[in-house]
Image: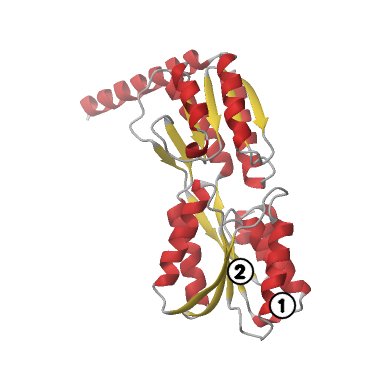
Amino acid sequence: MALQFTRRAAIMAAGFAALSASMAVAQGEKVALITPYLAQPGTQFYVEAFQARAAELGWEVNVIDTAGDVAAVIARMEDVTTQGVSAIVINVDPAQVGAGLAAAAAANIPVIGMDAGTDPLVRANVTSNGYAMAAETAVYVANRIAGAGNVVMFTFDAFPPVQVRGVVADAVFANFPDIKVLDRITPNVDDGGIADSRAKMEAILAANPEPGSIKAVWAAWDQPALGALQAIEAAGRGGEGIVITGIDANPQARDAIAAGGNFEASVAQDFAGIGRTTADTVARVLAGEVLRQNVVYVPTVLITAANVKDAK
């Protein structure tokens, strides 16, 4: 027993020493965080958490918002590369910023994804398990409508973490022969996505005026779900029992779920956890660690009326 305790103590001491060394190496680093999606609430939450953790680590962080312009991310990556930053964090599809990744690689500057995607030039991507989240909400929809009826989907294929959600939901619904995907919509997200999603949902409701003609709305994130909810309520069709689900469980979504209306479920991502874990992953890379995983998943939880109050 004493020998086991000694070994455990030695292991813990070694781990603490390694962490301390990592923290020491990371002090005073300059890190650029680049995203075109800062208008999204989820993005705001994990950027804030990243900044807070970076402050604890003694870093200088430059947050760059390209305001929906994905192409501009490349130019900004090239800019910060010439400025000699220690690391770059991206929140964008790596496949769309290849030239920026190449510039960083040429300068030996590590790039870490924060809810982005995988690429040989991205050391690691810290995110939620989009496959699991989409399966959970799609199965929720299928069960609630008893495996039959028309479903409207809101997707966004331009961003890998969201694109995979739509693929998984499609696969789930395909297992139910009596479920039909009535429409698959990609909303404009320049303002976050609520307004355009509402307008598109209003058009679908007008084209399908019969009660029961739409059984559910599955949204790959909360903003379209909220827009669809507004459209359904404005059309006076809230009493038809149209089931709405989203992903992110942002404050507006949680309030809607708590209200007990059509918006029934969402998946809470740990945005703060993503931000903190991304910063810690950057610290590990800067300390010289060779990461064994190129994807780091942060846990999630399904939010419904049963647990929404506890989740706030």
Reply above or below: 64 against 58: below
The answer to whether 38 appears left or right of 140 in the picture is right
Image disc number at residue 237? none
Q: Nearer the viewer, mark 2 or mark 1?
A: 1
- Asked if labels 1 and 2 touch by Cβ distance under 8 angstroms, the answer is no
Q: Residues within 10 Å of mark 2 (few under 14, many from 20)?
A: many
**Residue situated in front as seen by the camera: 181 or 63:** 181
The residue positioned 48% from the left and 32% from the top of the image is 98
- Snapshot quadrant of residue 38: top right
Residue at 52%, 34% in the rendered image? 97
The numbered mark, 2 or 1, whose residue comes first in the sequence reads 1
The residue singled out by tag 2 in the image is 244
Q: Quadrant of residue 153?
A: bottom right
SS of the residue at dot 1?
helix
Name the spot of residue 143 as percent of width and height, x first: 48, 75
- Residue drawn at the location 65% of the way across and 38% of the way down: 69
Place of residue 276 in the rendered image (x, y in percent of width and height, measured from the top left): 54, 34
Rendering coords of residue 46 (x, y %): 60, 39
Label 1 sits on residue: 206
Which amino acid type corresponds to the residue marked 1 in the rendered image? Ala
Residue type at mark 2 is Ile
Q: Is residue 241 above or below residue 121?
A: below
Alpha carbon separation for disc pair 2 and 1:
18 Å
Residue 110 seen in the current view: no
Where in the figure is residue 183, as x and y percent of width and height? 57, 70
- All told, the count of numbered labels is 2
